[in-house]
Image (cartoon, rainbow, N blue to C red):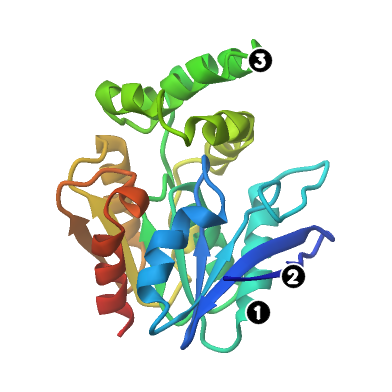
Amino acid sequence: MTPGSVRSEDGATIGYLRTGDGPPLVMVHGSLAVAESWSAVADLLADSFTCYLMDRRGRGRSSDAPKYSIEREYQDVAAVLRAAGPKPHLIGHSYGAVCALGAALQTPVDKLILYEPPAGIVFGPEVEDYRQAIAAGDTERALEIGITKIVGVPQSQFQALRTSPMLPMFKALAPGWVREMEEIERLGTDLDRYRPIESPALLLLGSETSDALKNATAALTRVLKNARVVELPGQGHGALRGAPELVAARVREFLT
């Protein structure tokens, strides 16, 4: 993979990895992730698409700014889209899919793929519990709250994560999840802002994912003019790593 970068509107440097050959496909990761979370999927698509795996601001190859807002993330994605070339495709996972939605309002994309965006979700008291755990420096407890109570991953899967080599990365990224959940809360439940999007849209939804994300996907499908849902059998929120072949196959079918 070849590294590159662009400058966003506020001066932040947004880094990415580029691989493959063909029409451009910009890939936006979620909250507890970096550009490499798309690596397995990108490797499977690189024979047909030029994949741009971007690091969202404050992660990996990308810088940050003192003031944060999701609107700045929209600008970051739009900057990578412009660098990718004409008629880019755009795919986002989780919070990254909400960033992709905002970017698609600003910069036309050929096709849009969204994997379980938490758009319009109303969080419960678990978010305040998460904030308090982060403030107390207990990132592992915060992750347990966030992953099992907010995302809805089974407790057994979180227990397996405790011994995973990915746990240190998750703990390092855990504080940044606070500002992202605050932005989702600020956006509220009204999804009408996304009605102007004209691009054909594919919404990927794991059959085992939480009811909250299933409801969010259904609500978004009713708003987008040209959208359809494809289920990922046996998967939840983590199919990028758990079933990359399945994700890549659904993406390829939609884009070709």
- Where is residue 135? Give x, y as percent: 66, 15
Which quadrant of the rendered structure holds the C terminus?
bottom left
- Where is residue 41? Give x, y as percent: 38, 64
- Disc 3 on helix, strand or loop? helix
Which quadrant of the rendered structure holds the N terminus?
bottom right
Residue situated in front as seen by the camera: 87 or 5: 5
- Disc 1 on helix, strand or loop? helix
Taking the image as shown, residue 205 lies to the left or right of residue 143, namely: left
Is disc 3 in contact with disc 2, using a CB cutoff of under 8 Å?
no
Residue at (63%, 54%) from the top-left corner? 56
Residue where numbered disc 1 is placed: 82
Quarter of the image for residue 150 reads top left
Marker disc for residue 6: 2
Give the foreground label among 2 and 1. 2
Label 3 to label 1, Cα distance in Å? 38 Å
Q: Which of pointers 3 and 1 lies earlier in the amino acid sequence?
A: 1
Residue at (67%, 79%) from the top-left corner? 83
Is disc 2 in contact with disc 1, using a CB cutoff of under 8 Å?
yes
Residue where numbered disc 3 is placed: 135
Taking the image as shown, residue 101 lies to the left or right of residue 251, namely: right
Quarter of the image for residue 211 reads top left
